[in-house]
């Protein structure tokens, strides 16, 4: 096991009817900016629950944070927060709203001229003391509700970057499984895939003798495999949604990654596909992951065998056959959710692959747990996925 | 899944050579009281590592916190802390030192006359703002290094009580697996059993549709079953000790207990056995737990079957046979570590059982996840365990 530090101060408030608890988590004296997306929270009743809970607070709103939150949108929120002297943010939405709000929390307390520097220069971000914020989660997927990471996109340059800041955790996050009942099938599917691949990025690397963490990751994967078809058949089941929410939040809150190597190459490649083709984030993961495991099968050998055995009960055959079967089972799971795991079927062209490979080449990318996934390897993966 | 709130702010600093990191976790201006036990830290080098790390800090020492930390000892530490105007505590030791230090952290900031009130009156404790403290863990077992609970004993009355205070978490805890190399066999065995039963208290209740938490608990149990014989055979293996430490800390830090019923009757009964007979805490758990599961087999039916199948691969036979086998496998695991799971073999008399049963009767005890374990049921359990 590798040395590590772990700290996660986010307070989880989990369960039915818990949104009203936000009133006591946000100081009465605070000037609050509530951030949200396209208005689905007005249809499913979450907006009303939040407004009712905060009826004695001073609240302004910033709506319109889009999927894959855009820098261009967020800088307006920053300007408004500064102008209104906001000192507490409340993100009401899924990962995109929460990620966007994390950027706002940093940017509103940054005095520099170019706010994009916060995204591309970790040193600048680390010197900012972010504004406090809480979240009301409406879509289990990204885990952003209990971590300090965010992914921000820039339209101007078709770029998408992840930022991390060790003090940028939500103060609290409310997870009420009932808010999931109104989620469309596409978002449920995406959330399940996103969570699955988050766990895989922290698990499917090389053995590091981290037995508790491995079992924890396997527990989330087994849970997702069990609940996924049931959720797709019945999106009004409280316990299923509760386990989905738990899986998503626990899958990327630092628990699974204590003292272990991490991959994240699937995400890096996926971000480029989303930036160029506006593919759903989860879709890009479902397409890339199985081919990445295939191309990297030698480096991932030990964990692929463990994964196959513990998750899919694959115990027969040669090592290569077992690994083939583990990868195939993974792709079949994504396909069972209705994903077509091929780039061309999703409108990605050979030219786009070239663009992406060139971007990684320019950055002299060395991705993955062993820093061995170069632009050349990315090309092999994307060609196979074509 | 039940509604729950979860927050755990403790910073884990895990790995080889990490004790030196405490220097930057404790403010330079702090007046530090270092608390420890009987001096084993002077033999295994931990004392020197701590003193070296804090060579630029203002540190006084309080030694002599014993196993099952005694109120009578701790009030001297409180008096010293007040006299020396201490404002940061550093516990260096196992669960007893850490538990004792949690009491000191509360008591040194309490103005009332009778410090025992903090232990027996949760309302009094909840109004105290405890002093900040960190820990350097030397014995994985109680999980105290990452939770806000403590167990304090009083010699005068042979009493032993658990206290909880939501703000009494360690600020940080250093877990260096190498400090375990010098642990005697008895402490290793006790730590493994203690951890196993901690997880069972949160897991072996009734099904609550908490799939991720169940898998998490099962992961720790499977890890303990795998590493226990290896640790008993080789106490200088870094990865084994790292997984032991992870199991102990993760087993009682709030992760496994999110949104699930909890039992803790084994602990309540065990505390009485320790208070009367000075039996090792873990020994009392190993004796009581299997008989408690046996007596409560109807209420615990669903989970006993799940436990048997997922932990011991018990899939054959009638339900009663499967449950018998799951309980037997549990006792055999404890016995494999050298425990004699019988009260009489450990010097407990029929009169002591009567005393304990009377204590629970006087308190009108209703223990367990369903509050159904009355004094009469305690008698059944202890008679079987005799």
Image (cartoon, coloured by chain):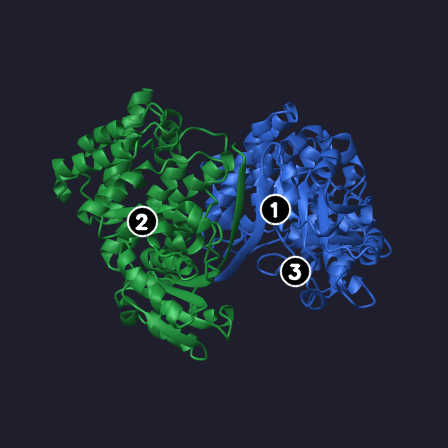
Chain colours: A green, B blue
Question: Helix, strand, or loop for circle 2?
Answer: helix
Viewer-side residue, B143 vs B322: B143
In the rendered structure, the answer to whether residue B7 lies left or right of residue A160 reads right
Kindly check if marks 2 and 1 are in contact, taking CB atoms under 8 A apart as contact. no
Where does residue B277 sit, x and y in percent of width and height? 81, 45
Q: Residue at the spot x=39%, y=55% of the render?
A: A245
Query: Considering only order in the chain, which callout, 3 or 1, is on the residue closer to the N terminus?
Result: 3
In three-dimensional space, the C-alpha distance between marks 1 and 3, rounded to whole angstroms, equals: 19 Å
In three-dimensional space, the C-alpha distance between marks 2 and 1, rounded to whole angstroms, equals: 31 Å
* Chain under disc 3: B
In the rendered structure, the answer to whether residue A259 lies left or right of residue B119 reads left
Identify whether B311 is placed above or below B69.
above
Where does residue A347 sit, x and y in percent of width and height? 12, 43
Using the image, tell me which numbered label, if any, was put on residue A197: none
Q: Could you tell me which quadrant the C terminus of chain B lies in?
A: top right
Question: Helix, strand, or loop for circle 1?
Answer: helix
The residue tagged 1 is B198
Viewer-side residue, A111 vs B85: A111
> What is the tally of numbered marks visible in this picture?
3
Q: Quadrant of residue B140?
A: top right
Mark in front: 2 vs 1:
2
In the rendered structure, the answer to whether residue B278 lies left or right of residue A36 reads right
Q: Residue at the spot x=60%, y=41% of the render?
A: B248
Residue A157 visible, this orientation: yes
Q: Could you tell me which quadrant the N terminus of chain B lies in?
A: bottom left
Q: Residues within 10 Å of mark 3 (few under 14, many from 20)?
A: many
């Amino acid at each position: 096991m590798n040395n590590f530090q772990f700290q996660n101060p986010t307070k989880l408030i989990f369960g039915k009817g818990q949104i009203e608890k936000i009133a006591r988590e946000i100081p009465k004296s605070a000037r609050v900016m509530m951030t949200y997306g396209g208005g689905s929270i007005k249809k499913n009743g979450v907006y009303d629950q939040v407004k009712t809970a905060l009826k004695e607070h001073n609240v302004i709103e910033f709506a319109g944070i889009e999927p894959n939150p855009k820098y261009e949108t967020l800088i307006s929120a920053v300007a408004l927060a500064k102008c209104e002297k906001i000192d507490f943010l409340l993100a009401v939405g899924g990962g995109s709203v929460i990620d966007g709000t994390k950027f706002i929390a940093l940017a509103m307390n940054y005095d520099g001229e170019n706010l994009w520097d916060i995204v591309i220069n970790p040193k600048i971000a680390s010197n900012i003391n972010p504004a406090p914020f809480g979240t009301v989660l409406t879509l289990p997927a990204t885990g952003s509700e209990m971590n300090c990471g965010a992914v921000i996109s820039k339209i101007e340059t078709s770029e998408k970057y992840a930022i991390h800041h060790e003090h940028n955790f939500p103060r609290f996050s409310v997870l009420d499984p009932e808010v999931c009942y109104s989620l469309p099938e596409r978002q449920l599917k995406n959330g399940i895939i996103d969570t699955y691949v988050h766990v895989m990025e922290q698990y499917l690397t090389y053995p590091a003798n981290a037995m508790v963490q491995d079992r924890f990751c396997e527990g989330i994967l087994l849970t997702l495999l069990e609940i996924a078809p049931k959720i797709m058949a019945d999106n009004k089941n409280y316990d299923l949604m509760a386990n989905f929410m738990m899986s998503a939040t626990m899958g990327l809150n630092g628990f699974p990654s204590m003292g272990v190597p991490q991959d994240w190459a699937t995400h890096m490649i996926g971000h480029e596909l989303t930036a160029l083709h506006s593919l759903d984030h989860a879709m890009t993961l479902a397409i890339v992951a199985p081919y990445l495991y295939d191309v990297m099968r030698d480096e991932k050998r030990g964990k692929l065998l463990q994964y196959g055995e513990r998750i899919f009960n694959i115990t027969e055959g040669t090592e290569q056959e077992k690994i083939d079967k583990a990868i195939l089972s993974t792709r079949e799971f994504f396909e069972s959710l209705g994903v077509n795991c091929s780039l061309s079927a999703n409108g990605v062209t050979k030219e786009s692959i070239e663009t992406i490979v060139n971007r990684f080449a320019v950055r002299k990318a060395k991705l993955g747990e062993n820093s061995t996934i170069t632009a050349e390897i990315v090309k092999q993966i994307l060609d196979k996925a074509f």
